[in-house]
Amino acid sequence: DGGITQSPKYLFRKEGQNVTLSCEQNLNHDAMYWYRQDPGQGLRLIYYSQIVNDFQKGDIAEGYSVSREKKESFPLTVTSAQKNPTAFYLCASSLPSTFDGYTFGSGTRLTVV
Amino acid sequence: SQQGEEDPQALSIQEGENATMNCSYKTSINNLQWYRQNSGRGLVHLILIRSNEREKHSGRLRVTLDTSKKSSSLLITASRAADTASYFCATDPFYFTGANSKLTFGKGITLSVRP
Protein backbone atom coordinates (compact mmCIF):
# COMPACT_ATOMS: atom_id res chain seq x y z
CA ASP A 1 0.00 0.00 0.00
CA GLY A 2 1.22 3.48 -0.81
CA GLY A 3 1.60 5.88 2.04
CA ILE A 4 3.74 8.22 4.05
CA THR A 5 5.64 7.07 7.12
CA GLN A 6 6.94 9.20 9.94
CA SER A 7 9.32 7.94 12.58
CA PRO A 8 9.72 7.82 15.45
CA LYS A 9 6.22 8.29 16.85
CA TYR A 10 7.59 9.76 20.09
CA LEU A 11 10.93 11.55 20.51
CA PHE A 12 12.57 13.09 23.53
CA ARG A 13 15.23 15.74 23.19
CA LYS A 14 17.60 17.09 25.77
CA GLU A 15 18.38 20.78 25.92
CA GLY A 16 21.03 21.74 23.33
CA GLN A 17 20.63 18.56 21.31
CA ASN A 18 19.80 18.24 17.61
CA VAL A 19 17.28 15.61 16.61
CA THR A 20 16.13 14.38 13.20
CA LEU A 21 12.59 13.36 12.32
CA SER A 22 12.16 10.95 9.45
CA CYS A 23 9.54 11.20 6.69
CA GLU A 24 9.36 8.68 3.83
CA GLN A 25 6.72 8.33 1.10
CA ASN A 26 6.15 5.77 -1.64
CA LEU A 27 3.40 7.66 -3.42
CA ASN A 28 5.73 9.07 -6.09
CA HIS A 29 4.75 12.56 -4.95
CA ASP A 30 6.97 15.43 -6.01
CA ALA A 31 6.10 17.80 -3.17
CA MET A 32 6.69 17.26 0.54
CA TYR A 33 5.95 19.45 3.55
CA TRP A 34 6.69 19.74 7.26
CA TYR A 35 4.17 21.26 9.66
CA ARG A 36 4.27 21.97 13.34
CA GLN A 37 1.07 21.67 15.36
CA ASP A 38 0.62 23.28 18.77
CA PRO A 39 -2.63 23.23 20.75
CA GLY A 40 -5.00 25.94 19.53
CA GLN A 41 -2.67 27.11 16.75
CA GLY A 42 -3.49 24.75 13.94
CA LEU A 43 -0.82 23.76 11.44
CA ARG A 44 2.13 26.02 10.74
CA LEU A 45 4.40 25.38 7.76
CA ILE A 46 8.08 24.87 8.57
CA TYR A 47 9.64 23.87 5.23
CA TYR A 48 8.46 22.51 1.92
CA SER A 49 10.05 20.97 -1.13
CA GLN A 50 8.50 20.76 -4.59
CA ILE A 51 11.38 18.93 -6.26
CA VAL A 52 14.43 16.93 -5.32
CA ASN A 53 17.43 18.99 -4.18
CA ASP A 54 15.31 22.08 -3.66
CA PHE A 55 13.34 23.34 -0.67
CA GLN A 56 11.89 26.60 0.64
CA LYS A 57 11.30 28.06 4.08
CA GLY A 58 7.79 28.20 5.39
CA ASP A 59 6.37 30.51 8.02
CA ILE A 60 8.40 29.24 11.00
CA ALA A 61 11.70 27.88 9.61
CA GLU A 62 14.01 29.32 12.25
CA GLY A 63 15.71 26.59 14.27
CA TYR A 64 14.90 23.88 11.72
CA SER A 65 16.73 22.42 8.72
CA VAL A 66 15.78 19.95 5.98
CA SER A 67 17.26 18.08 3.05
CA ARG A 68 15.71 16.54 -0.06
CA GLU A 69 18.31 14.24 -1.59
CA LYS A 70 15.77 11.64 -2.69
CA LYS A 71 12.21 12.01 -3.94
CA GLU A 72 10.97 9.62 -1.27
CA SER A 73 12.58 11.24 1.75
CA PHE A 74 12.34 14.63 3.47
CA PRO A 75 13.96 14.53 6.93
CA LEU A 76 13.56 17.42 9.36
CA THR A 77 16.28 18.34 11.86
CA VAL A 78 15.26 20.28 14.94
CA THR A 79 18.38 22.14 15.99
CA SER A 80 19.40 23.51 19.37
CA ALA A 81 18.54 26.98 18.00
CA GLN A 82 14.84 26.08 18.20
CA LYS A 83 14.01 27.31 21.70
CA ASN A 84 10.57 25.78 22.06
CA PRO A 85 10.57 22.54 20.07
CA THR A 86 7.97 20.63 22.06
CA ALA A 87 5.15 20.05 19.57
CA PHE A 88 3.49 17.56 17.25
CA TYR A 89 5.22 17.42 13.85
CA LEU A 90 3.39 16.37 10.72
CA CYS A 91 4.85 15.51 7.34
CA ALA A 92 2.74 15.58 4.18
CA SER A 93 3.19 14.96 0.48
CA SER A 94 1.31 15.82 -2.68
CA LEU A 95 1.40 15.96 -6.45
CA PRO A 96 2.50 19.33 -7.90
CA SER A 97 -1.14 20.42 -8.04
CA THR A 98 -3.19 20.59 -4.86
CA PHE A 99 -6.29 19.13 -6.53
CA ASP A 100 -5.63 15.66 -5.14
CA GLY A 101 -5.10 16.98 -1.65
CA TYR A 102 -2.29 16.24 0.73
CA THR A 103 -1.45 12.87 2.24
CA PHE A 104 -0.27 13.14 5.83
CA GLY A 105 1.87 10.89 7.97
CA SER A 106 0.76 9.92 11.46
CA GLY A 107 3.05 12.44 13.15
CA THR A 108 5.96 12.61 15.58
CA ARG A 109 5.48 14.02 19.06
CA LEU A 110 8.67 15.73 20.20
CA THR A 111 9.20 16.58 23.85
CA VAL A 112 12.10 18.43 25.43
CA VAL A 113 13.27 16.83 28.68
CA SER B 1 0.26 32.89 7.45
CA GLN B 2 -3.09 31.19 8.05
CA GLN B 3 -5.83 32.21 5.69
CA GLY B 4 -8.69 29.92 6.64
CA GLU B 5 -10.53 30.53 9.88
CA GLU B 6 -13.01 27.97 11.10
CA ASP B 7 -16.09 28.67 13.16
CA PRO B 8 -17.06 27.62 15.76
CA GLN B 9 -13.85 26.57 17.52
CA ALA B 10 -15.67 23.75 19.27
CA LEU B 11 -18.97 21.99 18.65
CA SER B 12 -20.75 19.39 20.77
CA ILE B 13 -23.80 17.58 19.44
CA GLN B 14 -25.85 14.46 20.07
CA GLU B 15 -25.45 11.41 17.88
CA GLY B 16 -27.87 11.56 14.96
CA GLU B 17 -27.84 15.37 14.75
CA ASN B 18 -26.26 17.30 11.91
CA ALA B 19 -22.98 19.16 12.43
CA THR B 20 -22.29 22.36 10.53
CA MET B 21 -18.82 23.90 10.47
CA ASN B 22 -17.83 27.12 8.73
CA CYS B 23 -14.64 28.42 7.21
CA SER B 24 -13.82 31.95 6.05
CA TYR B 25 -10.81 33.02 4.03
CA LYS B 26 -9.29 36.25 2.80
CA THR B 27 -7.91 35.95 -0.75
CA SER B 28 -8.98 34.37 -4.04
CA ILE B 29 -8.59 30.62 -4.17
CA ASN B 30 -8.26 27.76 -6.66
CA ASN B 31 -9.94 25.31 -4.33
CA LEU B 32 -10.88 24.71 -0.71
CA GLN B 33 -10.43 21.42 1.09
CA TRP B 34 -11.62 19.90 4.36
CA TYR B 35 -9.54 17.53 6.45
CA ARG B 36 -10.23 15.48 9.54
CA GLN B 37 -7.80 14.70 12.35
CA ASN B 38 -8.37 12.12 15.04
CA SER B 39 -6.58 12.80 18.32
CA GLY B 40 -2.83 12.26 18.04
CA ARG B 41 -3.01 11.27 14.39
CA GLY B 42 -2.31 12.82 11.00
CA LEU B 43 -4.86 14.66 8.90
CA VAL B 44 -7.04 12.82 6.41
CA HIS B 45 -8.38 14.48 3.27
CA LEU B 46 -12.21 14.51 3.21
CA ILE B 47 -13.43 16.58 0.30
CA LEU B 48 -12.34 19.27 -2.14
CA ILE B 49 -14.43 21.96 -3.79
CA ARG B 50 -13.14 23.99 -6.71
CA SER B 51 -13.59 27.74 -6.95
CA ASN B 52 -16.15 27.35 -9.76
CA GLU B 53 -18.29 24.90 -7.78
CA ARG B 54 -20.98 25.85 -5.28
CA GLU B 55 -21.82 22.55 -3.64
CA LYS B 56 -20.39 19.06 -3.42
CA HIS B 57 -21.45 15.83 -1.72
CA SER B 58 -19.56 12.79 -0.54
CA GLY B 59 -21.48 10.26 1.51
CA ARG B 60 -22.73 12.06 4.64
CA LEU B 61 -20.62 15.11 3.85
CA ARG B 62 -21.89 18.19 2.07
CA VAL B 63 -19.64 21.17 1.42
CA THR B 64 -20.68 24.52 0.03
CA LEU B 65 -18.59 27.40 -1.25
CA ASP B 66 -19.57 31.05 -1.58
CA THR B 67 -16.70 32.86 -3.28
CA SER B 68 -18.48 36.23 -3.03
CA LYS B 69 -18.48 35.92 0.76
CA LYS B 70 -15.18 34.01 0.82
CA SER B 71 -16.71 31.30 2.98
CA SER B 72 -17.38 27.59 3.01
CA SER B 73 -19.39 25.26 5.17
CA LEU B 74 -19.06 21.56 5.90
CA LEU B 75 -22.18 19.67 6.90
CA ILE B 76 -21.99 16.20 8.39
CA THR B 77 -25.43 14.62 8.42
CA ALA B 78 -26.67 12.00 10.90
CA SER B 79 -23.51 12.30 12.98
CA ARG B 80 -21.99 9.31 14.76
CA ALA B 81 -19.75 9.07 17.81
CA ALA B 82 -16.97 8.02 15.41
CA ASP B 83 -17.16 11.47 13.78
CA THR B 84 -15.59 12.94 16.92
CA ALA B 85 -12.41 14.61 15.67
CA SER B 86 -10.92 17.95 14.68
CA TYR B 87 -11.84 19.34 11.28
CA PHE B 88 -9.66 21.72 9.29
CA CYS B 89 -10.32 23.76 6.20
CA ALA B 90 -7.41 24.41 3.85
CA THR B 91 -7.27 26.89 1.01
CA ASP B 92 -5.20 26.83 -2.15
CA PRO B 93 -4.59 30.50 -2.97
CA PHE B 94 -4.82 31.71 -6.56
CA TYR B 95 -1.66 33.21 -8.01
CA PHE B 96 -1.77 35.10 -11.30
CA THR B 97 1.74 33.86 -12.03
CA GLY B 98 0.45 30.28 -12.15
CA ALA B 99 3.14 29.21 -9.71
CA ASN B 100 2.63 25.95 -7.84
CA SER B 101 0.81 26.84 -4.69
CA LYS B 102 0.56 25.22 -1.31
CA LEU B 103 -2.31 24.82 1.10
CA THR B 104 -2.90 27.10 4.06
CA PHE B 105 -4.68 25.49 7.00
CA GLY B 106 -6.98 27.00 9.58
CA LYS B 107 -6.82 26.35 13.31
CA GLY B 108 -9.48 23.67 13.26
CA ILE B 109 -12.83 22.88 14.84
CA THR B 110 -13.15 20.30 17.58
CA LEU B 111 -16.29 18.24 17.07
CA SER B 112 -17.62 16.05 19.88
CA VAL B 113 -20.49 13.71 19.11
CA ARG B 114 -22.14 12.35 22.24
CA PRO B 115 -23.50 8.79 22.04
Image (cartoon, rainbow, N blue to C red):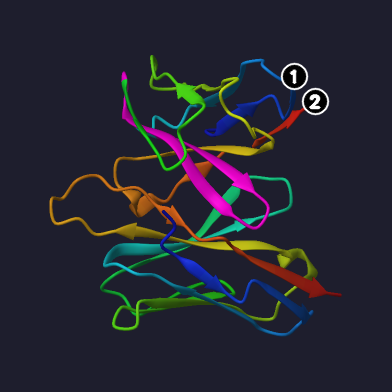
Q: Residue at x 30, y 58 (%)?
A: B93
Residue B111 horizontal side relative to residue A45, left or right: right
User: What segment is highlighted magenta in the picture?
Assistant: A32-53
Most prominent secondary structure in the magenta stretch?
strand
Residue at numbered disc 1: A14
Query: Mark 2 and mark 1 in contact (Cβ < 8 Å)?
Result: yes
Magenta segment includes A56: no
Label 1: state its secondary structure. Answer: loop
Identified by mark 1, the residue type is: Lys
**Residue B42 visible in the shown view:** yes
Residue B103 drawn at (x, y percent) = 39, 52
Give the answer, above or below, for where A98 lies relative to B59: above
Residue B31 drawn at (x, y percent) = 33, 63
Identified by mark 2, the residue type is: Val
Crowding at mark 2 (Cα within 10 Å: few <14, some 14-19, many 20+)? few
Label 2: state its secondary structure. Answer: loop
Q: Residue at x 34, y 57 (%)?
A: B92
As drawn, the residue found furthest toward the left would be: B97
Chain identity of mark 2: A
Residue A87 horizontal side relative to residue B54, left or right: right
**Residue A74 visible in the shown view:** no
